[in-house]
Image (cartoon, coloured by chain):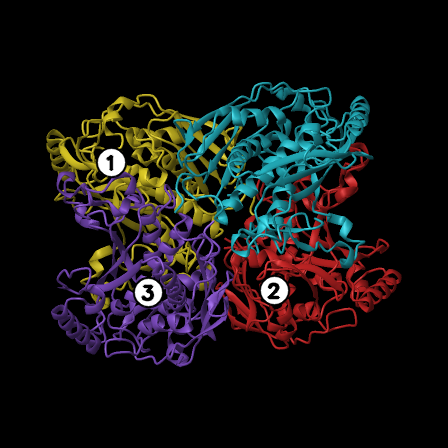
Chain colours: A purple, B yellow, C red, D cyan
Amino acid sequence: MTNTTGKMFTITTFGSSHGKALGAVVDGCPANLEIEVEDIQKELNKRKPGTSEITSPREEKDRVEILSGIFNGKTDGTPITGIVFNEDNRSKDYESLKNKPRPGHGDYTWTSKYENYDYRGGGRGSGRVTIGHVIGGAIAKKLLSKFNIKIISHVTQVGDIKAKKVNINFIEEYSSSNPVRCADPDAAIAMEELIMKYKEKGDSIGGKVETIAIGVPVGLGDPIFGKLDGELAKALMEIGSVKGVEIGMGFDVVGSTASTINDEFYMKNENKKVDEMQPNSDYIGTTTNTSGGILGGISDGMPIVTKIAVKPTPSISSVQNTVDLEKYENTKINIEGRHDPCICPRITTVSESAIAIVIADHMLRSGFIPLSNLEKTV
Amino acid sequence: MTNTTGKMFTITTFGSSHGKALGAVVDGCPANLEIEVEDIQKELNKRKPGTSEITSPREEKDRVEILSGIFNGKTDGTPITGIVFNEDNRSKDYESLKNKPRPGHGDYTWTSKYENYDYRGGGRGSGRVTIGHVIGGAIAKKLLSKFNIKIISHVTQVGDIKAKKVNINFIEEYSSSNPVRCADPDAAIAMEELIMKYKEKGDSIGGKVETIAIGVPVGLGDPIFGKLDGELAKALMEIGSVKGVEIGMGFDVVGSTASTINDEFYMKNENKKVDEMQPNSDYIGTTTNTSGGILGGISDGMPIVTKIAVKPTPSISSVQNTVDLEKYENTKINIEGRHDPCICPRITTVSESAIAIVIADHMLRSGFIPLSNLEKTV
Amino acid sequence: MTNTTGKMFTITTFGSSHGKALGAVVDGCPANLEIEVEDIQKELNKRKPGTSEITSPREEKDRVEILSGIFNGKTDGTPITGIVFNEDNRSKDYESLKNKPRPGHGDYTWTSKYENYDYRGGGRGSGRVTIGHVIGGAIAKKLLSKFNIKIISHVTQVGDIKAKKVNINFIEEYSSSNPVRCADPDAAIAMEELIMKYKEKGDSIGGKVETIAIGVPVGLGDPIFGKLDGELAKALMEIGSVKGVEIGMGFDVVGSTASTINDEFYMKNENKKVDEMQPNSDYIGTTTNTSGGILGGISDGMPIVTKIAVKPTPSISSVQNTVDLEKYENTKINIEGRHDPCICPRITTVSESAIAIVIADHMLRSGFIPLSNLEKTV
Amino acid sequence: MTNTTGKMFTITTFGSSHGKALGAVVDGCPANLEIEVEDIQKELNKRKPGTSEITSPREEKDRVEILSGIFNGKTDGTPITGIVFNEDNRSKDYESLKNKPRPGHGDYTWTSKYENYDYRGGGRGSGRVTIGHVIGGAIAKKLLSKFNIKIISHVTQVGDIKAKKVNINFIEEYSSSNPVRCADPDAAIAMEELIMKYKEKGDSIGGKVETIAIGVPVGLGDPIFGKLDGELAKALMEIGSVKGVEIGMGFDVVGSTASTINDEFYMKNENKKVDEMQPNSDYIGTTTNTSGGILGGISDGMPIVTKIAVKPTPSISSVQNTVDLEKYENTKINIEGRHDPCICPRITTVSESAIAIVIADHMLRSGFIPLSNLEKTV
C-alpha cells in the first residue's frame, strides 16, 4: 500500500504526469460532510501551473471530477474518488531524455528499480502527482474546517531573501496577494525578482516554506510510533524536492539551552472555577511556542508550526553530465520541457494538503471527530 | 498499533521508565540469522546512562534477556522478544512533580490525553523507552551486516561548537574514542567542556547528530507514501527531543541553485562490458552527494546521510513556571531527578537503531533480503 | 483503509451500484507484467449480469478502462487503476424502498451507521461493487499465471441438488459449458431448472461454490495472524451473501477421527538423489487432502480447496414485513428491481478473484514473486 | 506484522510451546479501564490443560504476570504486556519426531518455510500459543463488559453427538458446569463418554463450537474490506484446528429460499414517540436471526452467532506414515507426548478471545468506545 497513506482517514493516489489521468481515493471520511466539487477545485487551482510568470507554463485546466462517495451533496461514508484528466502533455519534449537520467531527479532510481519507466515528464515521479495529495487535502481541510482547524502555508525564504515574521492572523491574507505566496510584501517583491533572474538564466533556486495548523486541540498524536511530529515529518518529506523538516524552532535548538527555550505553562483563565475548566486547551497555554505545538509527540493546543527546505527544481536548461543507461557510457543532456524556476509558491498548497491529511487522520484516531458519521455522537 | 513500526520488519515496544520492564517484540526477521544476546547487549551498553561524566548518573545495568524467537542460536522466523527489567528507579524523586507538568516534556500532553499518567520519570514518555528501539535496531543491524550495510552515527555539533568534516571511513573509530561521540577529536574536547559547564549550571544544551547508512543498494523506497526519506524522517522525528531532520544537504538547499547542487551521474567502470554491468550501483555513481543518497524517494547507491536537531534536555534544576493540573492554578517547580546535560551522545545509538530498522524493513520490502528465510532464495 | 485489502498486493475499490462509476486501484503489482485491457475485460464478462436466463436482466456492458499503471503494455510498478462507468441504472425502481430496509439486505445497517445512504440498488452494499474485486482479481490471476498458479471455481450445490465430484482437471472446462457453472453436466441441468422454478415464483435459492487454487508452492502463509486459511476465509466471507467458509473437509471434520482423516506424507520421487530434491513440493506430497492444502496456516503444496455457503438473494418479489425508518412504524414492501434467482453462478468469478488476490499477496509476502520488478531477481 | 492483529485494538503475540515464555502485547486499549491480573488469570485457567480427564495432562500453572500498561490499577493508554513462563515442557518427548513431520500438523510446512524449526511440541505452531490470544481476549472482554457486551461459547457437537438448542440466557451457566462445556447436560455426558472412548484408543474426535456475542450495538463493521463477518471469520480460522466458519445459519442457507429465511424487521416499541427512538437497536429488531446479527457486513443489533468446525487433534498414538526430511525417504512415526482427545472444550475460551478482540477493535473503530481514554468523551 505504498500509494496509500493514513490510518483512519486515508488517501490512495494514482496516475502520472503524461498518462491518462491522475487522482485520489479518499477513504474514511465520515458521512454527512457537505462538500462540493468546488471545494476541491479551488485547492487544485492554487496548485496548478501557468498561473504566473514564475511558474511552469504548462497549461493544464486540472478540472476535477468526483466519481464516487458523495450522495445528495454530502459524503456517505464510502470512498470518495476525485480524478483529473491530463491534457497539455507535450511528451515529445522528453524523447531525448529517455535512458538519460536527469541529475537531481528520480529518473535513475525509478529506472533501476522498475526498468519499465514512464520517462515522460518524470512519470509518477513528477510533481504532478501532488494533484492526488491536493484532492485528499481539500477534503481533509473541509472536514477540519467543521472543527475550526485551519491550515495555512507561506514562503518564508527564497535563496538568501528572508521574509520578516508576520503575525499569524495575517499570513493567509498577505501571502495570497502575491504570486510568490510570501506574507512579507517587501520580501515578496525581492523574491519574485530573484526567481525571474534565475528563470532567465535557465537555472532555479531553493527556498523555505512554513505551514501552520491553527486550532488543533490538545491530545492529537499516538506515541511511540504514531507521534504527531513523526507523521508530519513523513508527510512533508514525501513531497518531492523537500530535503529538511523542522517542527517549532527546528535546527535553532542546536545552539540553545533548556533554560532559554523551555515553553513554560500558565493558566489562561485563572479566575474560572475548576469544574468549568475542560478541555485543557482553553485554560492552559505556554508563554512561548518553541516546541511548535507538540510535546512528547502529542499536540499541546498551541499552533503547530512546521518548516521545510525546498531544493531548487533540478530541471535546468544548461548542459549537464549524466550517463546513458542503455549504452552504459557517459553522456550529456540539455533539458528542455517547462519548469518552475522556484517550486516554493506551488508547494505551499501541497504542504497544506499533506498536513491537513495527517491532522484529519489524527482527529479521527484520537476521537475528536466521529469516526463514521458526523451526525452521530455515540 | 501505535507502538508498532515497520511493514515487513516490525518492532513493537512496551514498558516505561519506572514500571517493571521495557522491551520489544521484533517480527518479520527472516529465519536463520545467527544472533546472540551479546549482539543486542553491546548496543544497549552504548545507549545506557551512567557511562561517563556527561550522562545521567542513573545506574541501570540494562541487561537484556531474550524470551522467544531464537532456536539453536539462530532466528526461527517467529517473533523475537527482548526484555530489560528496571532496577534503579528512584520514583520518589518524581512525587513532587505529580500534576505539575515539566516545561518542554510530554507530561502535560500525556496527562491531558490519558489522565491516568505514570508521571514517574516521564513514564512511557521517557527517553528510557528507546531501549525498545535499540533492541530492534541491534537485530536490524545484525541482519544488515550480512548484506554489507553499516549504520554509523556521530555528534557533529554541540551548542555553537561544530565538528570538522571527517572522512566517512574514520567516523566510527574516531567518534567511539570519546564520551561525546564526536569524530573530530579537537571538537570533542571542546564539546565535553561545554557540556560540563552546563551540567554544573544545572542547565542543558542542544546539538546535532549525523547518521549515515553505508552500502545501501540502489532501489530501496516505495513511492509515493513509502519513500525512503519519508520513512527515515518519521523514524528520526519520533525520537524524543528531535525537532528537525535533514536528508543530504538539508536546509542548505534553501540558498542554492540547481546548477550548483545537482548531483551529476558518471560511469564508475566505463571499460567494463555492458553485459557485466549489473546491478547499477556498482557501475554508476554521482560525483557529489547533496541529495544524501536518495532521489525520488528511492536510494541511489550513495551513502544515505541524515542529520537531526536535538533540543537541550528540558529537565533543568532551576525553578520554572508551570501549572498545577489538579488545583488549576499557576505554580513553580524545581526538577531534581538525574538528567543528561546533553543527550546527543546517547542519541547516536538510538538514531542508528531507528535508521537500521527502516533500512532493514525496506531491504525486505524491496526484495533485497529473502522474506522468510535467509537460507532460501526463491 | 476499509476499502483496501492486501499487504503487498493491495486493491482499493470505490463506487456504487447507481453512482457514476465503479473501479479499483491495484497497488504493489511488480513492474514488467504484460497485461492488456482484455485480460480484465474477459473476467468482468464472466461476472456481468444479463448473460443468461438465470441471471439478473440488468444490461450493463461493464467495459473497463485502464487509467494508470500500464506503460508500453506492461505494468510499471505504479498503481493500476481500472474503471467501469454505470449505464443501465434504473434508479426509479428503488424510490419506493427509500427508508424501508429490505429484509436480508444491508439497507438497515448501512442507514443506521451512515444515515446518508444511497439506497438505489443497495448503493455500495450492492453486489455490483464486486466489479472492483474482479478488476483486482484479473490482474492477480494474470500475475499468478506467470508462476503456473491457476484459480478455478464451480457451483457444487443449488438448493438440494448436489453435483457429483469431478476430476480437478476437468472442472474448468465442464463448468464453463453451462450457465450454472456446474462441472457435473447432469446436475447443471437440474440446477438450472430449479433456479428457473424459483425465478418464476419471484423467490430465490441458495447454493454452494467451490474454489480451488492449483500450483501453489509450499510455504505461503504468515502465522499467527496472517495464516493463509485465515486470510482466505476473510476474503470469501467479505463477498456479499456468503454465510460460511470451509477449507478442505470443512464441517465434515466434526464427525471424524484423526486416525481416519490425517493426511499422511509420502515421497513422490524416492529414487531421486537428495541434493536434487528442492523445493519440497516436487518431492513430498500427502496421500489425501482433507486439510485442503494448508497445514498450520501455511500451504503444503497440495491444491487449496475452499467452499462457501451462498444464501439465496434476499430480493424477492413477494410482500415482506419491514419498518419505516422515517416514520418509525411497521410497514410492508414489495421489491421490484432486477435480481438473480441464484447468485452462485456469478459468484464463481468473484470467488476466484478474492482467492487470486490473497494468493498473489502471499506469493509476494513470502518472496515467491519478486517484489518490485518481475525482471529483477535480486 | 504477522503476529499482530487488529487495527485500533491490537494484540501482538510471541513465544512457543517449549521456549522460555509466551505472551502478548495489547495496544490501543483506552486509558482508565480498571483491570487486575485476576481478570486475565481466570481466562487462562479456563484454557489451560490438565483440568479434567478429557484434556491433555501437561501440567502448566500458566500464571500470567503483567509487565507494563497498568498504573494504579487502571490502564494508562500504553501497551499492556502479559507474560506466562513455560514450566512443564518435556521436550525429550519430541526428539524422535525431529525431521519427521506429524500428519495433520504444521511441522512439515513450518520446516519447509523456515528450516530452523522448533519441533518441540510444535514450537510456535502449538496450540499453546493461544495463551497470547487469551491474554488479549481477557482484556478485550473486560473492556467490552463496560459496554454491556458479553461473549459466550459452548460445544454444540462432538463426533455425531449433537447438543439440543439451549436458550441463550442459560448457555454460559449450563456449559460451565461440565468439562465438555456443552450447555445440554445430557449431550454433555454422552460427549464425555465418547471423548474418553477415543482417548483410550489413542485417537481423537472432532466437534463444533458456537460462540455468541450479546449486546453488540447496530453499526459495527467497515465495508468493504473490514466487514465484521469477514474479520470474525479470519480470527476464528486462524485458531489451530479450525476448518470451517459459519455466521448465523451458515451452510444451512444452501438449501434455503429467501422467502423462508429473510429476517423481517419490526418495531420493538411502536408506541414510543419518534424523537425518543435513538439508537435504532433499542427500537428495531428482526423476528428471526438467520443472518447471525450481521447484514451487509455491519452488525444489526441481534446476537452475533458464529460456529466453527474443529478437527480431531492430529496427534494420535497409532503408527502413521510420514517422510524423513533429512534422509528424504518414507518413514513411520508414533507420537507420544500429551494431547487432547478432543480440543473443543478448550477451544471455547480461545474462540471467545478471538471474537472479543475483533468486537473490541470494531467498537473502537466505529466510535462506540472512546479511543484514547474511557473517561473522556470528546
Q: Name the residue under label 1.
A: B101
Classify mark 3: helix, strand or loop.
helix
In this rendering, which labeled residue sits more in front, label 2 or label 3?
Answer: 2
Q: How crowded is mark 1: few (under 14 residues within 10 Å), some or many (20 or more)?
A: many
Residue C252 rendering spot, x and y as whole percentages: 79, 42
Please give the chain letter of the residue carrying mark 2: C
| Three-letter code for the amino acid on which mark 3 is drawn | Val
Q: How far apart are marks 2 and 3 (CA)?
A: 32 Å
Q: Which residue: 37% across, 26% down?
A: B19
Viewer-nearest residue: C309 or B181: C309
Relative side of C66 to C51, left or right: left
Residue D320 rendering spot, x and y as whole percentages: 78, 31
Q: Name the residue under label 3.
A: A350
Residue A76 disc label:
none
Residue D20 rendering spot, x and y as whole percentages: 52, 24
Up the image or down, C281 lies above or below C116; here it is above
